[in-house]
Image (cartoon, rainbow, N blue to C red):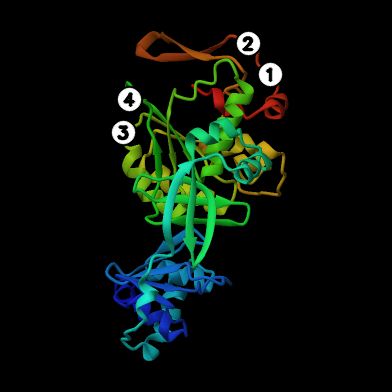
Amino acid sequence: MNIQEAKQIRIADYLQSLGYTPVKQQGSSLWYKSPLREEKDASFKVNTDRNLWFDYGLGKGGNIIALAEELYASDYMPYLLNKIAERVPHIRPVSFSFRQQASEPSFQQLEVRELTHPALLNYLQERGINTALARSECKELHFIHNGKPYFAIGFPNVAGGFEVRNRFFKGCIAPKDISHIRQQGEPREKCLVFEGMMDYLSFLTLRMKNCPTMPDLDRQDYVILNSVANVSKAIDVLHGYERIHCLLDNDEAGRNAYLDLARGVSGRIRDFSDNYRGHKDLNDYLCGKQQNITVNPPTNHRKTQEERAGIMNGRCSKLILQGLGGSKFVFRVYRNRLLPTSQVLKDGIPLVNTV
């Protein structure tokens, strides 16, 4: 069996051969309790028209090859193709029937309000987030889920869906997509890329904390992936930027997402995750939560001490001098003196002042 032959297998039929049956259907979407983890409510979707899957609990998805990678914990293609081929004798075309109420949406009676609920604001404060900033970026959602009323923080995406968070729940209201925050006025040359909404809110909080009089939050645009599975969607909007700075998680998923982005927008992208090395993500950095992480940035993207920092709580400007033979020499001129890296990292994330 080769890759193209494997992709011809319907994911729903393949899952059925493994003993997984959908619990409901919404149009062309079959919903399963995830085969990749334990869960009570179905959040694993198979789009039968496109023959693609997505696990909303993991934030991962793709074709049957990507599913096999998760099921069998390997990326070795011959092994994966062999595992898929083993199921071929057991694969039969199947159809499913459900009671009418199974086609109802998971989230009903959605009401979008301004973010004011004390429980949600307290949750954000526990995560170290500046609630005034959060109120300007997020909404308060009230909805019915499986017959019960809930409320949560909603972070809108470009497709009209929401990332949904409260102290007890992490999910999304479809459609799942990236969030793209574009500033008013002249198009920005720089865009910062984050993995999730809490990373973005943590960045805004750090900027406001470290540069209260001149946070310059509107100097650049922002893209929030909302899932590493959305990298291809992010690439589509990032092509218009001259400088792209990534602040993704310090784990394997974050590293792979950066590499995928770098392949898509090569030459204009920088990795700044080493600015919060020793922390899984920006929110852990903000909260002072340490984690043993061994993922390192690519050596060809390592930065000098000056570049790593952005380096102080003042502005950095560029002085470009024309040299002999047409060469350009770039000097960075700082209003304040260079701080030791340890002091910079202790006082606040340095990247916030990158040029």
Residue at label 1?
A: 339
Amino acid type assigned to the residue bearing label 3 in the image: Gly
Is label 2 in a helix, a strand or a loop?
A: loop
The numbered disc on residue 240 is 3
Determine contact: label 3, label 2, CB under 8 Å.
Answer: no
Q: Is residue 22 left or right of residue 150?
A: left
Pick the front one: 312 or 16: 16
CA gap between label 1 and label 2 equals 9 Å
The residue at 39%/14% (across/down) is 327
Label 4 SS: loop
Q: Are marks 3 and 4 in contact (CB under 8 Å)?
A: yes
Circles 1 and 2, Cβ within 8 Å, touching? The answer is yes
Locate residue 20, reporting x and y percent: 46, 81
Which disc, if any, is residue 187?
Answer: 4
Task: Please state which of residues 20 and 191 is positioned toward the viewer in this rendering.
Answer: 20
- Across the whole image, how many numbered discs are drawn on residues? 4
Instruction: Specify the amino acid type for callout 4.
Output: Pro
Q: CA distance from mark 2 to mark 4?
A: 29 Å
Foreground tag (4 vs 1): 4
Q: CA distance from mark 3 to mark 4?
A: 9 Å
**Residue nearest the observer in this picture, 191 or 203:** 203
Q: Earlier in the sequence, mark 3 or mark 4?
A: 4
How far, Cα to Cα, is label 4 from label 1? 32 Å
Image point (66%, 28%), residue name? 348
* Residue 305, quarter of the rendered image: top right
Q: Is residue 23 left or right of residue 159?
A: right
Q: In the rendered structure, which amino acid carries the disc numbered 1?
A: Leu
Q: Which residue is mark 2?
A: 336
* Residue at the farthest bottom position: 89
Determine the image quadrant of residue 201.
top right
